[in-house]
Amino acid sequence: MYAIVDIETTGGRYNEEGITEIAIIKYDGHQVVDTFVSLLNPERNIQPFVVNLTGINNEMLRNAPKFYEVAKRIIEITTDCTIVAHNANFDYRILRTEFKRLGFDYTKETLCTVELSKKLIPGLESYKLGKLCRSLGIPVTDRHRANGDAIATTKLFKLLLDKDLQKTIVKNHVRHEPKIQLDTKLLNILEELPTSTGVYYMHKEDGEIIYIGKSKNIKKRVNQHFTSSSPKSKKIQSLVVAVTYEITGSELVALLKESNEIKKNKPVFNRAQRRTIYTHALYSFIDENGYINLKIDKADGRKNPITTFGNRPSAKSFLFSSVEKFELCQKLTGLYHTKQSCFNYTIQQCKGACIKKESTQEYNDRVNKLIEHNSFQDKSLLIIDRGREVNENSVVLIENGLFKGVGFFDLNYQINHIDVLQSLITPMENNRDIQHIIKSYLRSKRVKKVINLTT
């Protein structure tokens, strides 16, 4: 659990500042679960430059509660939480100072969104909250007021969690969370899980990820792990102390994140999924008569396939449907072995490429349509799909045929700004497994939209 904090102060000498306004947003990594916002009477005057910056003046605070009156509420909302703030050293220092004046030792783990942003989104012009949010397409209202800045910091932190592919933030958080009792731990873990589409991460006591999976129903899938009697599942059950998760909305995004993060984190119980996930591929070659032939073969990393498949039967099924869709020749696709005409020619469903009756240009045009439809070599695409919330979409970015990463954007704003969209994309490694996942998903599943950016 995270407590995202923003504090406005009177200004003045170091460690003599007083709090004029505080906002705390309790965030479980997925949604806001509690909020506390209040003006405070600092019992000292506000510096003039601070009044100009925040709009908060001494008169506004005359009847506001003093810190000791809200201290209990602050302790309650931040219990078992890591403090998150933009420039966390400042906000945490101010909180500790106020509690110290009351004789209370307030100690928390902290995370700074300035430091996280510099690490996870390097090269930006400025990391001040306002400029950083504008560059990332995060709307900010009531700038330099505690609630407005805390809301913006929450949205920024959500984006940083998405970009943290090594899961450093989550692993450290699990390490410092209070541990539940062993006999009830699995039931307690399940109670906290959603029934949404996404990726889940199983952790040991020290925070290490031991298994990564994806599911259209996270709770149902994890329950299967916890109730299975297989040797692997029993080992997982004995080691797991926490399950964290990321809701993706899109099954495609979940598949891509699962593959990418298994390779990055190398969980001990994901050994099988570290290997290549496809076995066969569709290749093309031009025969001695100038016709483009298609051929299913075992996947060869040295060759450039049109598309890839998990096994030979799925490859043949795809090719049979493609022959029908694009009116191709069974003989030239390797589905009908003969020295004469193919079977489809005898029933007038082949135009005669098998016996050189159809011109190479006409036939090859249709083959090229199949290739173009199933390959994004040299193409730049946005694959738009469901987001995590109703007002959000997910996006998969492909540039010049290479997978660049995934992101999420607000339906009403960010898709109109490609430069902003680039900043929102979480970079991921392009590899043959990723290419296979995208191509096979587009073959078999519907996405909301595919936008071709290639000019």
Image (cartoon, helix red, strand yellow):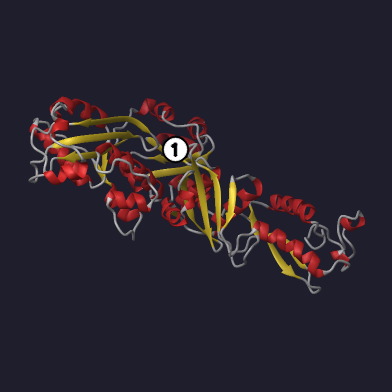
Q: What residue type is labelled 1?
A: Lys
Q: Quadrant of the C terminus?
A: bottom right
Q: Position of residue 114 (x, y in %)?
A: 27, 50
Q: Where is residue 294 in the image (x, y as percent from the top left)?
A: 74, 62
Q: Position of residue 410 (x, y in %)?
A: 46, 44
Residue tagged 1 = 235
- Quarter of the rendering containing residue 382: bottom right
Q: In this view, does 118 lie to the left or right of 218?
A: left
Q: Is residue 50 above or below residue 421?
A: above
Is 219 or 162 nearer to us in this picture? Answer: 162
Examine the rendering and report whether any part of residue 24 can be seen: yes
Give the total number of marks visible in the rendering: 1
Is 125 or 443 nearer to us in this picture? Answer: 125
Q: Quadrant of the N terminus?
A: top left
Q: Is mark 1 on a helix, strand or loop?
A: helix
Is 275 or 421 nearer to us in this picture? Answer: 421
Q: Which residue, as the protein is rendered here, is positioned at the far right?
A: 346
Q: Residue sitting at 46 percent across and 32 percent down?
A: 194
Examine the rendering and report whether any part of residue 175 can be seen: no
Q: In this view, does 232 lie to the left or right of 130?
A: right
Q: Where is residue 401 in the image (x, y as percent from the top left)?
A: 56, 62
Q: Which residue, as the protein is rendered here, is positioned at the far bottom?
A: 288
Q: Residue sitting at 32 percent across and 41 percent down?
A: 141
Mark 1 surroundings: few (<14), some (14-19) or many (≥20) residues within 10 A: few
- Quarter of the rendering containing residue 299: bottom right
